[in-house]
Image (cartoon, rainbow, N blue to C red):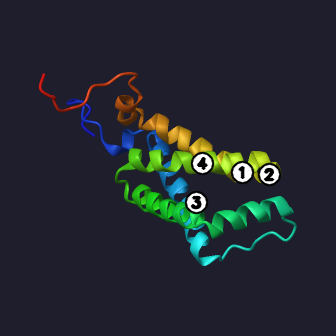
Amino acid sequence: MNTNTGTVGTENKSFTCFFPHVARVILALAFLLFGLNGFLNFLPVPKDIPQDIITVSMALMKAGYMNVVSSVEILVAILLLANRFVPLALALLAPIIVGILTFHIALQPKTIGPGIVVTLLELFLAYSYRKAFRPMLAAKVAPSEKCGT
């Protein structure tokens, strides 16, 4: 680092600058694991699942909903790991996380821990990429193309 020119090298970067990268990779790996599990079923299913959860899960699987969710989870994980289209990946992940939280709050609150972790990671990353979301959160916008005006 050259202190006279004000050039900052990587050795002066704060450790906190790496938090979004670490959070992005952890979130990606979590959803890659669960997305792949949706197709390959390699994680063991707990033995003491209440009948309500079995009924809901079977209905979602039968309807093909879980295949869509698992596919989106894998796509999002790849985008996050590749560090490409991260705001889009976070936007795609948001309704899945809402579904996870809703499921656990309504049916199995004891196992909500991982849902809270991915929610916190998602919120942290959304905050980290807030500039990308700013246009989406405008209360009123006009179309890009002029329509004869």
- 46 relative position to 69: left or right: right
- The amino acid sitting under disc 2 is Leu
Q: Which mark is residue 103?
A: 1
Q: CA distance from mark 1 to mark 2?
A: 6 Å
Q: How far from the left and from the top, in percent, is residue 86? A: 40, 48
Q: Nearer the viewer, residue 110 or 103?
A: 103
Rate crowding at label 3 as few (under 14), some (14 to 19) or many (20 or more) other CA atoms within 10 Å.
some
Mark 3–mark 2 distance (CA, rounded to whole Å): 21 Å
Above-or-below relation of 138 to 50 = above
- Badge 3 element: helix
Distance in Å between CA atoms under marks 2 and 4: 15 Å
Work out whether residue 68 or residue 127 is closer to the camera in this orientation and state it: 68
Q: Which mark is residue 97?
A: 4
Label 2, secondary structure: give it: helix
Residue 24: give its label: none
The picture places residue 111, in percent across and down from the top left corner, at 78, 54
Q: Secondary structure at mark 1?
A: helix
Q: Which residue is mark 3?
A: 30
Q: CA distance from mark 4 to mark 3?
A: 12 Å
Amino acid type, callout 4: Ile
Viewer-nearest residue: 110 or 53: 53
Which numbered disc, 1 or 4, marks the residue closer to the eye? Answer: 1
From the image, tell me which residue sits under label 2: 107
Q: Is residue 93 left or right of residue 56?
A: left
Instruction: Please state, as top left, top right, bottom left or bottom right, where the N terminus lies in the image.
Output: top left
The answer to which of marks 3 and 1 sits earlier in the sequence is 3
Answer with the quarter of the image where residue 36 lies: bottom right
Q: Earlier in the sequence, mark 2 or mark 4?
A: 4
Q: Nearer the viewer, mark 3 or mark 1?
A: 1
Amino acid type, mark 3? Ala
Discs 1, 2 touching: Cβ within 8 Å: yes
Closer to us: mark 4 or mark 3? 4
